[in-house]
Amino acid sequence: MLFLSHVYGVVPSRRLGRSLGVCTIPFKTCDYACVYCQLGRTTNMTNTRQTFYPPEEILSEAREFIEAHGEESFDVVTVVGEGEPTLFKPLDAIVRGLREMTGKPLVLITNGSLLFDRELVEEIKDFDIVMPTLDAKDEESFKRINRPFGKLTYEKVYKGLLDFSKEFKGEIWLEVMLVKDYNDSDRFLGELKNRIELLGPARVYINVPARPPAEENVEIPEEETLRYARALLKAESIEELPVSSFTTSEKKSLDAVIEIIKRHPMSENDIKSFVESQFNDEFVVDLLKRLNKNPNVEKNSYRGKVFYRYILAGRRSGG
């Protein structure tokens, strides 16, 4: 088994079941610098779509995984990124290639920022599910929460999402990340509700910053607020699932943990559970010591837990 850099999982997801992840972009390449991002601050801020890797390089890893583990090992294939996956082009080449390998649903997880781009819309029309994010209600909140690339405006992004919602033949599952004192007031939620109703998504999910965020002042709203938001937006909450439910193709426990924390920060307990269940490895303490010495791994304390996440060496990510 080769070292897989574009394909990871299978990842347990309450929304999607068992998800095989396909990453199309380099680490932390994004057109947002969201205050809540669990992967830390954006280190490669761009709004230019590029062919970061040859499509066949990505597809060959997906093919290798499916041949090794079979289609029965996952429920969906999720095109996602350690940043914003729609910055990759041509995405239609990825969709066509995946369709040839599997009959499972294809899902795109995106911040929705580039849906005004007609070339992109044409490339992603054959996904079964597109899962964009909408956290803001106007330009001020957009800049405060998502901190977009300079040329992006709220109205341009929202209109792109609105137009896309009218023509996309698959399902749109919208995610809202709620952050205390940023977008959780009754008035804010009321205005956001109006924006969401115009989009008419098939589903709405509420998420919260459950892992270390990019910025220190980011907190989870009160439970009463979350209950109100769920009722108002007719939404479901996304609950955290045990990392021990992950499946990996990596042969070494350290490689497996690092590949996971590039996309999904892990607590010490997560790592212990995952390593013991997947590798029958009793030397978790030694593994944690090696993580602590790795220049590409950052250790954070958040809400009473210690988490590990991936960073680019020499660039502290905040949180």
Image (cartoon, helix red, strand yellow):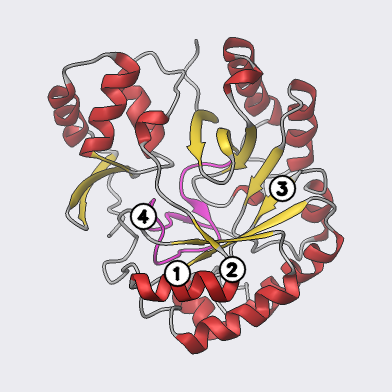
- The reply to whether dot 3 and dot 4 touch (C-beta < 8 Å) is no
Q: Residue 191, can we see it? A: yes
Is 42 a magenta residue? yes
- The reply to whether dot 1 and dot 2 touch (C-beta < 8 Å) is no
Is 29 a magenta residue? yes
- Mark before the other along the chain sequence, 3 or 2: 3
Tell me the number on the disc at residue 40.
4
- Mark before the other along the chain sequence, 3 or 4: 4
- Mark before the other along the chain sequence, 1 or 4: 4
- Mark before the other along the chain sequence, 1 or 3: 3
For label 2, the residue is: 134
Which of labels 2 and 4 is toward the front?
2
- Mark before the other along the chain sequence, 2 or 4: 4
Amino acid identity at mark 4: Gly
Q: Quadrant of residue 175?
A: bottom right
Residue 131 higher or lower than 243, as above or below? below
> Which is more toward the observer, 64 or 230?
230
Q: At numbered mark 3, what does the secondary structure look like: helix, strand or loop?
A: strand
Q: Residue 90, can we see it? A: no
On screen, residue 10 versus residue 261, left or right, reads right
Tell me the number on the disc at residue 143.
none
Which of labels 1 and 4 is toward the front?
1
Residue 271 location, x and y as percent?
Answer: 27, 32
On screen, residue 296 versus residue 166, left or right, reads left
> Which is more toward the observer, 60 or 202?
202
Residue 200 higher or lower than 280, as above or below? below
- The reply to whether dot 1 and dot 3 touch (C-beta < 8 Å) is no
Tell me the number on the disc at residue 178.
1
For label 3, the residue is: 129
Region in magenta: 25-45
- The reply to whether dot 2 and dot 4 touch (C-beta < 8 Å) is no
